[in-house]
Amino acid sequence: IHIHTLKNQIKSKNPPSFNKNHMDFQNRGGARAGSAGAAGIQDANIERRERLRKLALETIDITKDPYFMRNHLGTYECRLCLTLHPNEGSYLAHTQGKKHQTNLARRQARESKDQQVVP
């Protein structure tokens, strides 16, 4: 770049590195790892979980669940898996989880095996 060009750019208040067609992505969300992109995903996951919890509370009657128990501390207990849960939504999420489902399958397999032996 010539000196005359630099002087003209300074007079016109356009620095030499300024390019009107180039966008600066440096301070945008997701520009660097851990900057802002993950928070958006995290918020979406929290929102999704809350939506599913509310839907489950409306559709599932946990009073009919044979493994559901409220203890003297006010927390909820799964008698099948021996887990403690601070609220009903957490218990319902647990009932959809891998641990509870495998324990249910194990219990049903054991009961069906016992019924075949008894008669």
Image (tube, rainbow, N blue to C red):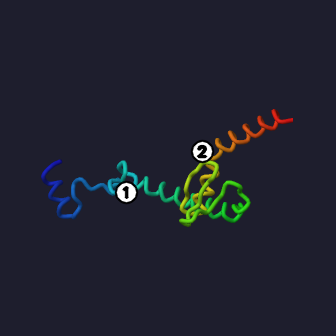
Pick the front one: 105 or 17 = 105
86 w.r.t. 26: above or below? below
Q: Residue at x 15, y 49 (%)?
A: 2
Counting residues from the start of the chain, the first of labels 1 and 2 encountered is 1
Residue at x 77%, y 36% (from the top left corner): 114
Q: Residue furthest front?
A: 118
Which type of secondary structure does the marked residue at label 2 adopt? helix
Q: Residue at x 63, y 64 (%)?
A: 54
For the residues carrying marks 1 and 2, which lies nearer the camera in this image?
Answer: 2
- Give the residue at mark 2: 99
Q: Residue 9: image x %, image y %?
A: 20, 59
Q: Quadrant of the C terminus?
A: top right
Residue situated furthest left in the rendering: 3
Q: Please give the label number shown on residue 14.
A: none
- Residue 64 lies in what quarter of the image? bottom right
The residue beneath circle 1 is 28
23 vs 18, left or right, is right
Q: Position of 17 compared to 49: left or right? A: left
- Mark 2, Cα crowd under 10 Å, few <14 / some 14-19 / many 20+, is few
- Residue 10 percent location from the top left of the image: 17, 61
**Number of other residues with Cα within 10 Å of mark 1, as a class: few under 14, some 14 to 19, many 20 or more:** few
The residue lying at 37 percent from left, 57 percent from top is 28
Is residue 74 shown above or below 102?
A: below
Amino acid on which the number 2 mark rests in the picture: Lys
Q: Is residue 101 above or below residue 47?
A: above
| Pick the front one: 92 or 39 | 92
The residue most toward the top is: 117
Q: Position of residue 86 (x, y in %)?
A: 54, 62
